[in-house]
Image (cartoon, rainbow, N blue to C red):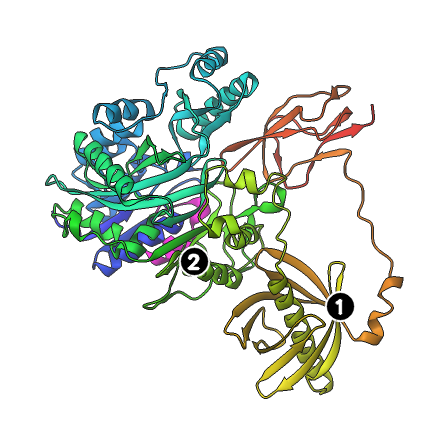
Amino acid sequence: MTITKLLIANRGEIACRVIKTAKKMGIATVAVYSDADKEALHVRMADEAVHIGGSAAKDSYLLADRIIAACKQTGAQAVHPGYGFLSENASFSAALEAEGIIFVGPGPKAIEAMGDKITSKKLAAEAGVSTVPGHMGLIADAEEAVAISKSIGYPVMIKASAGGGGKGMRIAWNDDEAREGFERSKSEAASSFGDDRIFIEKFVTEPRHIEIQLIADSHGNVLYLNERECSIQRRNQKVIEEAPSPFLDEATRKAMGEQSVALAKAVGYRSAGTVEFIVDKDRNFYFLEMNTRLQVEHPVTELISGLDLVELMLRVANGEKLPLTQDQVQRNGWAIESRLYAEDPYRNFLPSTGRLTRYRPPAESVSETLVVRNDTGVFEGGEISTFYDPMIAKLCTWAPTRIEAVDAMAIALDSFEVEGVGNNLPFLSTVMEQDRFREGRLTTGYIAEEFPEGFQGAQLSDEHHFDVVAAAAVLMARRDQRRTGAQAESQWHVQVGDKAEKVVLHQQGPDILVDLDWRSEAVRVTWQPGDSIAHLDWSGGRHAVLKVTPTTSGFRIRYRGADLKVVVLRPHIAKYLSHMPIKVPPDMSKYLLCPMPGQVVRVDVKEGDVVEDGQALAIVEAMKMENVLRAQKRARVKKVHVAPGAVLAVDAVMIEFEAV
């Protein structure tokens, strides 16, 4: 059967991604949608759309019978599952097969074998794949989990057997953490996957997370398309990925690729799949799991290989042979992917919801020296809800070298405008500027090690501070010129935080010479009052992009991870700044505020209890992740304002304290 109409059993950016390739191949597309996604981008992009149920995934995207009914209703001969939801559900694949509908993915047996982490590790070992020491059997309770952890030796990783996306995973360094980690992982696994089985394995210190992309056809051909480095993770959820890895040598790359191919052949695998490994500092690698689907981070592999993985999946599903051999697989240049999430990095990356009042990604482009790609499933005016993953977009850059790709990513992130919801753009920008990242010294503990106190905003280099000061002065001069007709040549007092600068501007044709006590340089600025983005082209060839919002006394400028209130005044006015009163924010330390929109799962204290620093107070679930809220200091509980089941907005008062 040749596929002429394809149903995408997913939503968001991955549904849009699949639709783009299907249309390129001349295949008609069918979207499915829940109540919450009635106006979603994937619905707008598809040729047809079918409503399949309520907003919660369990009432729509996880209902196999609704998907099959939509296929019959529209005449779709095939289903692409994307990732998440039913993408690794063997019974769904089998049900489609029974109805004569093509599943664009591996067969049910391969999904079942590789989808269960315990079974997959046993099969991997039998296929000669290096595996991590651990306990693969079922674990009855938390006390058995502690005993197993002690026998393996701390630290250990506690993982849901049917898990994925960082859910149902905890690292434990001692008995107490093993006990709590087992309980939380089991609860999250039951909630997210309907399967609460847990296993425990050794946690490799100084680990890198490196994975091998596979593509296989139904004629016995399996190729590895090189590797991706996915070490920068938070809560075991990948945040920044790249291809290739800056760490692997050719011998290790070949060994990992060949072992991955051996595993795929052992289970009769077809379609796209990924074998994930943990790699230690000596390049010893250990099998983690096999994902029997398209990965979120597949674009970076596409950018270095020149292949369209979705197209290959569809051709394999059509029964075609792979169009290339292992020797023909390219590894060209370097690609970086940054996952843009609706989450607040200043609140420990807690999920954010709301309407995208502004959504302006950087322009996509393709040239011989630079590619900018943005995979997204949202649009300006759309809403980020509590029902699904908080991903907004996947921003990718490609360049001939790693450092060029990183620099391109930094500029692309600076150019990305998102308003209305908290987002991790400042964090992503900050990472791009860190020496450790730029040098490729990565581990899965990167975020915890580099931001031990959480993300507090970026500290700008002298060069980037100069960019901000110069931009603020030039922009204020332009505002002043429009209002008064004055020339751009002028003097300004620019204050960033507690650092003040005297700036003199001199017009030099189309350029402006920015003169500070410690640096002078000519710049050409592309900005007019009302613009939200300012472009600075320095005489030395450097380019900078700043997000700009006017304020009564200057600008709010966001640049390279910093979010700055910049005061710009004429010198004769600036001398009065020291006399201005400073507004002191109210003291909220006696309250536990809900840090994110979510539902209360459990309250662990009652009125009158005395709590200690670090003690668990309550658990709030948001985006299917359980978040333990802890006391910040010793205090007595004066009043509990919430009960389990309550749905809370961000900053809702949960518990009130008083001094002991």
For the point 46% across and 16% down, the residue is 149
Hey, which quadrant is residue 191 in on the image? top left
Which amino acid type is marked by label 2?
A: Ile
For the point 73% across and 58% down, the residue is 497
State yes or no: residue 45 in magenta.
Answer: yes
Element class at badge 2: helix
Which amino acid type is marked by label 1?
A: Ser
Residue 466 place in picture, x, y as percent: 64, 67
Circle 1 is placed at which residue position?
A: 553
Hey, which quadrant is residue 561 in on the image? bottom right
Residue 437 vs 618, above or below: the answer is below
217 displayed left or right of 115: left
Q: Residue 89 or 29: which is nearer the viewer?
A: 89
Residue 47 place in picture, x, y as percent: 29, 57
Residue 400 vs 97, above or below: the answer is below
Depth check, mark 2 against mark 1: the one in front is 2
606 displayed left or right of 75: right
**Magenta stretch bounds:** 32-51
Residue 650 place in picture, x, y as percent: 64, 41
Q: Which mark is residue 403?
A: 2
State yes or no: residue 262 in magenta.
Answer: no
Residue 133 place in picture, x, y as percent: 36, 21
Q: Which mark is residue 182?
A: none
Residue 350 vs 379, above or below: the answer is above
Q: Residues within 10 Å of mark 2 (few under 14, many from 20)?
A: some
- Is any part of residue 16 visible from this angle? yes
366 displayed left or right of 648: left
Q: Residue 542 or 378: which is nearer the viewer?
A: 542
